[in-house]
């Protein structure tokens, strides 16, 4: 058995096994107890291992367990036992004759105890009983006697016992006092999927994998058995369908159930076929007294009816086994009974289809009606399975209807986030349909299934436009997808042109989406006025009376009957023009709101996909204009709305937007939770990974933020999504900067230079990009590349539009202040940083304020304004702690510790100037004998930067040569204390006498002899 998903449990078990005299692992059959026992027993520290694994048949054989335990104990180890106990033990082990009376049984126990003590003189002894429930009673009595008398810590016990779900071990008396009970829990769905994939060496189709996960319920043995049976089986038909159960597993599970009377077995079969079996349903299906039959099944541990009459199988695999064990005709009859008995139309349609497993138009229509009902209730996954079943039941003589139903299934699957199945259904239509309109719809589904990976879809769009010729609505939708593709791929000019074409010829819903995308493109290009115009027009269209249902296929000028002959018109998500799925950049700097003559959206028309997209767009516009509260108030209701169905990507788009808002608002703990929800909705996608990384930079750890951001970068690159690549690289740069060390700064520069290059290639100029320019300049300053940092800031200032948000100006001022300090002009830098703080104080941006306060405190410390530095850092620490900004709280504490160390140094008369992190690292390397070229290679900076920085270090330390610096560094290893002038607080001090390095584990350098004298 593989140990998938058991690493944490195995580690915990090892700790307990080492600390306690005994450990009992317990859980139901197949849960993986034996695999854990084997792994623990294989530990070399276990010493001598005495092992037995009794089976059910062994329980009736006296001393069978003892024979196994002593199987590897040589006869020579028993020679030193007293004669009577030795003879009794040899008799029990079938190695000789002896008495079987009471005295003989006592002698066996004494002999076992003495033998274990003798073995323990050579090293640790581990007793392993894998299957306490089947241990024969004589052996159990021997162990119970022995373990109560073991005082030797070198003798331990490891056991496993099978118990029902939620039960406790019943044979703890066989284990030493103080034994720890450790339940073995079920695997998660993700762990089950990994186990099945690795165990089979291949992936199962999604529908089969879900059926295996539901039925195995986290049991590894059942999962592997079901997976092997499902590998060559067709996909299960209908929602909640059961996977095939192999013959051997059925025989094992139903050995006693097969002896039940036929009426009881028939009752169990009908219960197994129902999605929600109950006594009421079974009576409606024709069983006059189902409770009596279930009572017999309950005695065998198969199924039971609770106090409310709900029928429950002891484990889902039993339900699947009962269903699979019946003949095909019996299963059909069970479904036919349920089709007449269930009141719910969706389940009734499923049973009708399973009772008639052949092509039938009436059945297909019934299934499509049920699919529409399920979709209306927000159950998109169920709607997909019903529509796919309807397509299979559609007669071959009706290919057009079959294609329509397949397309509906594909669209429902998209809504449910089941893109692989959606792509398969749409691909089948594209390959076989003679209808150009159906092929266009299939291509639109495939575009939606592509997620962020639209870079390679040019041919798909071009072929679709050829098929759509003469249909302006379909052409408009394809032009909109071309606009989205251009936006994601950084082709802003082409994206704007396609968006204009879509807005000119599409139906109302497509026009709204296209205008929102156009607003997004123009905002990214730094043209907020054009973005205002496009979004205002979209809002006007959305508020207009008597508009249709937008992009839904049923809204194309009353063509619903032509497009969807069945009463199930699926909702179709189109790309989000804001910050969520597919589209991820920031937007313009000006407030966009509905103009005075645009009425508020009526409630019945404010919840659809178009309005959600526009609301997100308005929220992001507000966010990037520093109106964070307004942005949050717009986005939160999108998640709180009850009963409104939304596709998985629409939900993720909203969650990504909310994560961004919460991070900027300083709701760091909430951002972590929102990002986790995002990851659950769409695992391992670029949007979800980006949101998780962003939240981690604010409230997690730098290590986690770097890991997630790197994964988001890889996912964006794989998709060809330049917008999310920009975001992911920016977050990666921010995560690397959190440490404040040169190596992190070098990695940050690498990531943020790519952001700069991508932004320039896309002609982007939106507020987040300008923030990222500031981050790049900060990273360059840490590396000592002050000249390059100045060039970056000059470039950024040239891109700042009139009326830019205060946070953009503050970010650039912060970087400028740090650059001034890096050039040795700490007081001038502090002035810049105080100006940045003043810009941020009126804004609801506490994370930005904390970053700036930390920078100000560090620079004030270097300027020997200790009181001012302490005040800024204390405020930074208090704010960071309050909002849950853990990484920044660590930075603030570190800076306060440096300041305190400096004060102690001042009191000791060992004051001197600080070295920046890069200056300190260069001084350390040069003091160790490294050449300038070697230093440059180590720190990922240029030789020119090393030379310039070394000159500043010479000046600060008061030396003129590498030899003198090396001497100063050597003395610093011995010296301690901290770094500030002993002059009065906030007053200029005399020239430095010692050196302090402003990074962790930095050395204090006493001033060396003046070599100029």
Image (cartoon, rainbow, N blue to C red):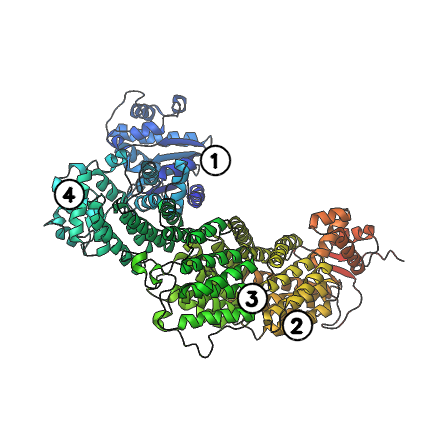
Q: Residue furthest bottom?
A: 596
Q: Name the quarter where the C terminus is drawn.
A: bottom right
Which residue is disc 1 drawn over? 45
Q: Which residue lies most toward the left here?
A: 288
Q: Secondary structure at mark 1?
A: helix
Q: CA distance from mark 2 to mark 3?
A: 16 Å
Mark closer to the chain start, 3 or 4: 4
Mark 3 vs 1, N-terminal side: 1
Image quarter hosting the N terminus: top left
Whole-percent x, y for residue 68 in the image: 34, 28
Q: Which label's residue is closer to the chain start, 2 or 4?
A: 4
Residue 701, by quadrant, is: bottom right
Residue 943 screen position, x and y as percent = 76, 51
Q: Check disc 1: other Cα within 10 Å, few if <14, some if 14-19, many if 20+.
A: few
Residue 436 shows which numbered tag? none
Asked if 649 appears above or below 423 in the picture, the reply is below
**Mark 2 falls on what kind of element?**
helix
Separation (CA) of disc 3 from disc 1? 50 Å
Which residue is tagged 3? Answer: 847
Residue 500: x and y in percent read 50, 64
The residue that label 4 is drawn on is 266
N-terminal of the pair, mark 2 or mark 3, is 2
Judging depth in this view, the residue of 699 and 943 nearest the camera is: 943
SS for dot 3: helix
Mark 2–mark 1 distance (CA, rounded to whole Å):
61 Å
């Amino acid at each position: 058995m593989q140990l998938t998903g058991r690493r944490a449990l195995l580690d915990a078990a090892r700790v307990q096994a080492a600390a306690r005299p005994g450990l009992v692992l317990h859980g139901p059959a197949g849960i993986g107890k034996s695999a854990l026992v084997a792994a623990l027993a294989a530990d070399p520290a276990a010493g001598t291992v005495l092992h037995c694994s009794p089976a059910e048949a062994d329980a009736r054989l006296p001393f069978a367990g003892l024979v196994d335990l002593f199987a590897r104990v040589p006869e020579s180890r028993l020679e030193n036992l007293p004669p009577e106990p030795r003879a009794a033990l040899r008799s029990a082990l079938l190695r000789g004759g002896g008495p079987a009376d009471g005295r003989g049984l006592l002698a066996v126990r004494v002999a076992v105890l003495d033998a274990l003590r003798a073995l323990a003189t050579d090293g640790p002894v581990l007793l392993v009983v894998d299957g306490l429930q089947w241990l024969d009673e004589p052996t159990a009595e021997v162990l119970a006697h022995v373990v109560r008398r073991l005082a030797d810590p070198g003798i331990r016990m490891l056991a496993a016992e099978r118990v029902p779900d939620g039960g406790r071990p019943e044979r703890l008396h066989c284990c030493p006092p103080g034994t720890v009970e450790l339940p073995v829990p079920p695997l998660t769905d993700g762990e089950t999927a990994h186990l099945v994939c690795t165990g089979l060496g291949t992936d199962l189709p999604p529908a089969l994998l879900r059926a295996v996960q539901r039925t195995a319920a986290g049991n590894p043995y059942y999962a592997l058995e079901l997976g092997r049976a499902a590998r060559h089986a067709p996909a299960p038909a209908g929602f909640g369908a059961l996977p095939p159960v192999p013959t051997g597993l059925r025989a094992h599970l139903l050995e006693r159930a097969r002896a039940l009377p036929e009426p009881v077995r028939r009752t169990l079969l009908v219960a197994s076929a129902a999605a929600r079996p109950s006594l009421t349903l079974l009576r409606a299906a024709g069983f006059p007294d189902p409770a009596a039959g279930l009572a017999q099944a309950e005695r065998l541990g198969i199924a039971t009816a609770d106090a409310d009459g709900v029928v429950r199988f002891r484990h889902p695999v039993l339900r699947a086994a009962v269903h699979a064990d019946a003949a095909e005709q019996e299963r059909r009859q069970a479904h036919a009974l349920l089709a007449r008995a269930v009141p719910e139309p969706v389940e009734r349609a499923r049973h009708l289809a399973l009772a008639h497993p052949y092509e039938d138009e009436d059945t297909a229509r019934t299934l499509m009606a049920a699919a529409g009902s399920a979709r209306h209730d927000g159950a998109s996954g169920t709607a997909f399975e019903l529509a796919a079943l309807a397509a299979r039941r559609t007669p071959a003589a009706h290919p057009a209807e079959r294609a329509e139903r397949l397309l509906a299934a594909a669209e429902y699957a998209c809504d449910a986030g089941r893109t692989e199945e959606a792509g398969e259904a749409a691909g089948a239509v594209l390959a076989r349909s003679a209808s150009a309109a159906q092929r266009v719809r299939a291509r639109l589904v495939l575009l939606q299934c592509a997620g962020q990976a639209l870079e390679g879809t040019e041919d798909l769009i071009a072929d679709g436009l050829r098929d759509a010729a003469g249909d302006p609505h379909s052409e408009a939708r394809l032009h909109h997808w071309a606009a989205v593709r251009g936006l994601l791929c950084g082709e802003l000019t082409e994206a704007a042109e396609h968006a204009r074409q879509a807005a000119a010829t599409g139906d109302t819903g497509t026009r709204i989406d296209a205008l929102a995308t156009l607003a997004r493109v123009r905002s990214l290009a730094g043209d907020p006025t054009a973005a205002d115009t496009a979004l205002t027009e979209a809002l006007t269209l959305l508020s207009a009376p008597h508009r249709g249902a937008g992009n839904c296929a049923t809204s194309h000028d009353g063509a619903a009957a032509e497009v969807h002959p069945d009463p199930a018109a699926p909702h179709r998500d189109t790309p989000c023009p804001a910050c969520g799925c597919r589209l991820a950049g920031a937007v313009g700097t000006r407030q966009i709101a509905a103009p005075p003559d645009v009425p508020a959206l009526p409630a019945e028309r404010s919840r659809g996909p178009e309005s959600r997209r526009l609301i997100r767009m308005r929220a992001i516009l507000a966010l990037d204009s520093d109106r964070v509260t307004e942005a949050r108030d717009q986005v939160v209701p999108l998640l709180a709305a009850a009963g409104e169905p939304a596709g998985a990507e629409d939900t993720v788009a909203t969650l990504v937007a909310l994560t961004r808002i919460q991070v900027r608002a300083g709701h760091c703990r909430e951002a972590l939770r929102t990002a986790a929800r995002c990851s659950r909705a769409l695992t391992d996608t670029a949007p979800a990974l980006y949101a998780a990384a962003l939240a981690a930079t604010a409230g997690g750890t730098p290590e986690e933020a770097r890991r997630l951001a790197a994964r988001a970068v890889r996912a964006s690159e794989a998709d060809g999504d330049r917008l999310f690549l920009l975001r992911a690289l920016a977050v990666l740069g921010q995560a690397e900067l959190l440490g404040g060390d040169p190596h992190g700064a070098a990695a940050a520069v690498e990531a943020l230079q790519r952001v700069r290059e991508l932004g320039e290639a896309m002609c982007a100029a939106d507020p987040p990009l300008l923030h990222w320019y500031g981050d790049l300049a900060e990273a360059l300053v840490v590396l000592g590349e002050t000249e390059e940092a100045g060039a970056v800031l000059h470039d950024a200032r040239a891109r700042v539009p009139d009326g830019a948000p205060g946070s953009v100006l503050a970010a650039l001022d912060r970087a400028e202040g740090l650059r001034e300090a890096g050039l040795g002009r700490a007081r001038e830098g502090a002035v810049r940083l105080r100006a940045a703080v003043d810009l941020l104080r009126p804004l609801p941006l506490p994370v930005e304020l904390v970053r700036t306060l930390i920078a100000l405190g560090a620079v004030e410390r270097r300027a020997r304004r200790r009181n001012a530095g302490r005040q800024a850092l204390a405020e930074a620490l208090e704010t960071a702690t309050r909002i849950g900004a853990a990484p920044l709280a660590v930075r603030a504490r570190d800076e306060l510790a440096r300041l305190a160390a400096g004060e102690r140094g001042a009191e000791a008369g060992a004051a001197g100037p600080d070295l920046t992190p890069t200056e300190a690292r260069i001084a350390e390397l040069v003091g160790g004998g490294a050449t300038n070229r070697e230093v440059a290679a180590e720190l990922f900076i240029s030789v020119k930067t090393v030379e310039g920085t070394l000159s500043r270090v010479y000046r600060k330390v008061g030396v003129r040569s590498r030899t003198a610096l090396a001497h100063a560094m050597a003395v610093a290893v011995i010296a301690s204390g901290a770094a500030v002038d002993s002059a009065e607080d906030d007053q200029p001090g005399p020239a430095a006498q010692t050196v302090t390095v402003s990074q962790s584990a930095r050395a204090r350098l006493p001033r060396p002899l003046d070599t100029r004298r």
